Structure formats: C-alpha cells, structure tokens
Image: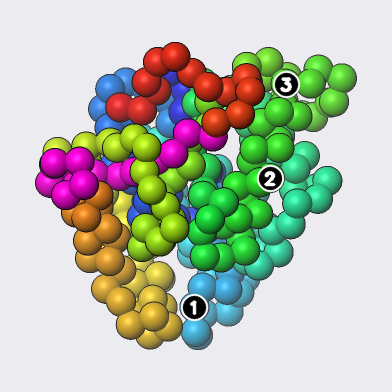
Amino acid sequence: MRVLAIGAHPDDLEILSGGTLARFRQEGHHVVMCHVANGNLGHTEIPRPELREIRREEAKRAAALIGAESVTLDLDDMEIFLERDSRMKMTNVIRQAAPDVLIVPSLNDYLADHIASAQVSIDASFVATLPQLVTEAAVHFKLTPIYFADTVAGIRFEPEEYVDISAVQDIKRQMIACHESQARWLKEHDNIDYVEFAMKQSAFRGVQCGVEYAEGYRLHRVWGRIPTRRYLP
C-alpha cells in the first residue's frame, strides 16, 4: 500500500503521526511524508532563508529513520491559503505519490496553516483524479480514504480509530528529536519540552484505548471516500 501523510510544518507529522508512519513502514508499505510550509518562521534567531534549509534537512533525517520519502510544497510559514497555486502544487504531489490512503491535519486544529493545509489536501486529492487537468505528474484516478490526524494537545478532537504505537514509541521520539531547531524554539516560545509534550499526548490516547501509547484519527466521512476495510495499521 502507498501512504501519503501531509503535515503543515516539517515536524507536525512526527508529533501527531510518527508512530503510525513507523508502523506502516514496518509492515512494508511505502510512505511519503509531505510538509506544506517550510518552517521558516519557527525560530527566534536563525534567519528565515537559513532556517528553511535547516528544517528541510531535519525533515529528511526524520523520514530516513523509518525509510520514508520526504517532500515539501515549500510554502512560507503563515502563507498557506486555499487558492489555485497551492492546490495545483498539492495536486502534483498527490499524483506523484499515487496514494491508497491519505493522512491530513485536522480541520479543528489551532493554527491557520494546519487548517489550510487540510483543506488544500482534501481539494487537491479530488483534483488529482481529473485527467483533463494537467500537471507534471500523471493523473491519479483513485479517490482515496482520508484520515484526519489528531490536533495538537488533542483539543477539540475525539478519535474514532486508534493506532497502537507502543512498540515504536522510541522511534517516534527519535523522529521528533531530529528537529533540533524546534526544541529550543518551543522551549523559548511555548515553555514546553518538545518530545515529552508529544509523548504525553500519545500516552493519553493510549489510556483511552487500553495500550501504553497510541495515536488517534478520524475518517473524513463524505461520499466516495468511506472504506469498508481498515487502512490504518
């Protein structure tokens, strides 16, 4: 199976879906990790052009830990909007990835970049099936199931499905820790321990479903996308 996971910023997937993606890879599935924004506003001191490059490399290292592919739309932070250019870029990414299943940010999350990334992804996944709309990559005819990842801190999100990540929790920690530039930024900006913040949320989701660590998801329940099988590991 081919999995395309989309996050707004270079570390969002690792925080909210890192364990799930690790499990997908362990089961032999192809995983593409796409971040929409380049993360160039996420630091106090590092200049934006330099930070963009640093965060790109951090994302590549995190993906490499599980043998996933890392791609980016390379939009600037806080410059993600539901408009033609972003939708066409995402359409091309989806066609290149040719996914059987999509993971996208929650439409209820706290930040405009997250919400816009979700809506752009949903719209582009339909556009990707239209053969007369031409992009660099070939048309991808499959209208895939879409799963919303958890929100940051789990606020305004009630999971429908859980993935047990207990056996891969160390890998998730390592993936998050690859984003070294963010550890200091989040300590200064939000006064949180980057890795422990994410793992506490996974522990809480684990309590809900009776395992040590878990990640939660909701299915995008619209016509044409409701599966009759479980896609999550």
The reply to whether discs 1 and 2 touch (Cβ–Cβ < 8 Å) is: no
Q: Which of the two discs, 1 and 3, labels the residue nearer the N terminus?
A: 1
Question: Which label belongs to residue 43?
Answer: 1
The reply to whether discs 3 and 2 touch (Cβ–Cβ < 8 Å) is: no
Q: CA distance from mark 1 to mark 2?
A: 25 Å
For the C terminus, the quadrant is top left
Which residues lie in the magenta part?
206-220
Instruction: Look at the image and say whether residue 210 sits in the magenta stretch.
Output: yes
The answer to whether one can see residue 171 in this image is no
- Position of residue 166 measured from the top left corner of the image (x, y, whole percent): 15, 42
Badge 1 element: loop
Badge 2 element: helix
Identify the residue under disc 2.
Answer: 120
Give left or right: position of 9 versus 218. Answer: right
- Position of residue 42 measured from the top left corner of the image (x, y, whole percent): 51, 73
Q: CA distance from mark 3 to mark 2?
A: 15 Å
For this orientation, the residue located farthest to the right is 132
Identify the residue under disc 3.
Answer: 129
